[in-house]
Image (cartoon, rainbow, N blue to C red):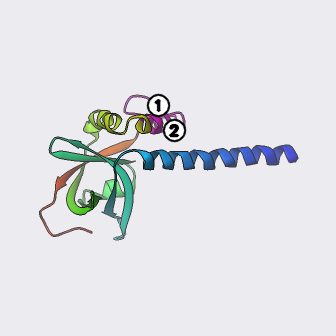
Amino acid sequence: MKRLLVIVGIVVSSVIGYAAIHLAVIEVGREIVVVHRRTPDGEVSPARLWIVDDGEVAWVHNGDADTPWIRHLADEPILEIERGGETLRFRGIPDRSADPRVHRLLREKYGAADRLVRFWAGTDTETGVVTGDTCRAVPVRLEPATDGAGP
């Protein structure tokens, strides 16, 4: 019984440790933005994400294609992004075809922090140690919103 408790303790500690390290690595990476997105039930949900710029276009990279907020972008594409002390409105457009380019931009901007996250979660071409799969995230292109709708 004592051996079982030790094993359970090690497993629980490992999971908690992994989660803490993962969150710390994400927060230590360079720029973090807060994305306010409307969920399918009408609530506004904030998320802290990395962001990369590609010329005139910015990208956030969060959530696989099956997450509710990514699916809901077709109905409610307006997002508010807190970046550099400003809150700006964007139209979020999921674009899976941009995944390799966005992964490259993330590696360039976030360096070792991105490599560590992708080691665990996978990239567009390599499986992650924890997930056992390639990255299922869908890059979201951010285009300036000009209408009054949104969160």
Please tell me whether the stretch drawn in magenta is mainly helix, strand or loop.
loop
- Percent x, y for residue 119? 48, 33
Q: Is residue 91 above or below residue 10?
A: below
In the image, what residue occupies the spot 40% across and 33% down?
123
The residue positioned 38% from the left and 58% from the top of the image is 47
- Range of magenta residues: 115-133
Would residue 60 appear left or right of 19 to someone viewing this image? left
Label 2 sits on residue: 131
Viewer-side residue, 49 vs 61: 49
Q: Is residue 134 visible?
A: no
**Amino acid found under the numbered disc labelled 1:** Thr
Q: Secondary structure at mark 2?
A: loop
- Report crowding for label 2: few under 14, some 14 to 19, many 20 or more residues within 10 A (C-alpha): few
Dot 1: element = loop
| Residue in view at x 74 percent, y 48 percent | 9
User: Where in the figure is residue 115, as x and y percent of width and height?
Assistant: 43, 34
Location of mark 1 (residue): 127
Relative vertical location of residue 36 with respect to residue 21 in this rendering, above or below: below
Write down the quadrant of residue 33 in the picture.
Answer: bottom left
Instruction: Report how many numbered discs are placed on residues in the image.
Output: 2
Whether residue 107 is visible to the viewer of this picture, yes or no, is: yes
